[in-house]
Amino acid sequence: MEQTVRKLRTIYGRNEAPSAPGVRRFLRKVHETGILMDNRSALPVRTAERIAAVVQSVRENPRTSQVVTEH
């Protein structure tokens, strides 16, 4: 682990390199999920509810497109 952190510091500089705990979290996530990217970057899921909302919106006003966001 320490070797990895040192190498990252030589590449990114002391202030920009990830910390040892950050590297550990990243490695744990990769081992647990097999995914390198955050889920936040994934596309929204097409649920029946969302599709129905879009269909209803188009029926109400077919000339206007809307962006529906859920948080």
Image (cartoon, rainbow, N blue to C red):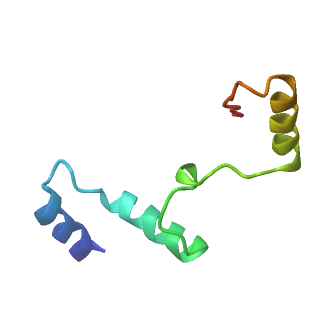
Marks counted in the figure total: 0
- Horizontal side of 42 relative to 57 (left or right) equals left
Q: Residue at x 72, y 25 (%)?
A: 63
Q: 62 and 21: which one is in front?
A: 62
Quarter that holds the C terminus: top right
Q: Residue at x 88, y 40 (%)?
A: 52
Q: Residue at x 72, y 52 (%)?
A: 45
Q: 54 and 71: which one is in front?
A: 54
Q: 20 and 11: which one is in front?
A: 11
Compared with 29, 55 (above or below) is above
Compared with 71, 33 (above or below) is below
> Residue 49 is drawn in which quadrant?
top right
- Horizontal side of 43 relative to 55 (left or right) equals left
x and y percent of residue 9 in the render? 16, 61
> Residue 53 is drawn in which quadrant?
top right
Quarter that holds the N terminus: bottom left
